[in-house]
Amino acid sequence: MLDDSLSEAFTAWLEQRWLQSKKGNSYIRTADGFTITIFRKDLGRFAFCIFSKPSARFLENAATDCGISFFSKSEYSSETEAKLWAYEKLEQIRATHEISETAEGVDDTPISTIL
């Protein structure tokens, strides 16, 4: 069973305004510059990807920063389950990178390469 703080975080994550890409996939952009996309796989399963553009907010040397690109290897039985696992992975990524709480200039147009 989830502790209350984690349950509240998951609930808040799911209740955010998820957008729809031209290809019909749910996606969201975070204030710190991540784009998370949930997409359908074969046989009705779901997966997710997390992208960020290169930026000075990552690490100390922005010149060597290539941004982040992560695709889930697992497939999930529902879109909600994929969103929850995407949240878990996003928190892992945030914990392993030095990221400021706010990012300026976050583009809110869909990434054309979203599956």
Image (cartoon, rainbow, N blue to C red):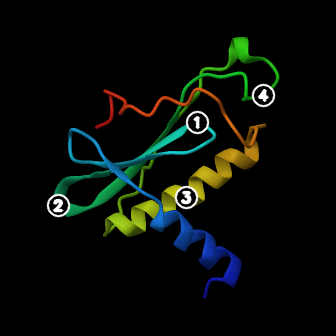
Q: Amino acid at mark 1?
A: Gly
Q: Earlier in the sequence, mark 2 or mark 1?
A: 1
- Taking the image as drawn, is residue 70 in sight? no
Q: Secondary structure at mark 1?
A: loop
Q: Is residue 28 above or below residue 13?
A: above
Gap in Å between the C-alphas at discs 1 and 3?
14 Å
Instruction: Give whichever of 73, 58 is nearer the camera.
Output: 58
Structural crowding at the residue carrying mark 3, measured as other residues with C-alpha within 10 Å and reported as few (<14), some (14–19) or many (≥20)? some
Q: Mark 2 near mark 1, Cβ–Cβ under 8 Å?
A: no
Q: Earlier in the sequence, mark 1 or mark 3?
A: 1
92 on left or right of 88:
right
Circle 3 is placed at which residue position? 87
Circle 2 is placed at which residue position? 43
> Label for residue 59?
4
Residue at the image position 78 percent from the left and 28 percent from the top: 59
Gap in Å between the C-alphas at discs 4 and 1?
14 Å
Relative image position of residue 22 (x, y in whole percent): 22, 38
Q: Secondary structure at mark 4?
A: loop
Relative image position of residue 76 (x, y in whole percent): 35, 64
Instruction: Give whichever of 19, 89 is nearer the camera.
Output: 19
Q: Secondary structure at mark 3?
A: helix
Relative image position of residue 97 (x, y in whole percent): 74, 38
Residue at the image position 50 percent from the left and 62 percent from the top: 85
Total numbered labels:
4
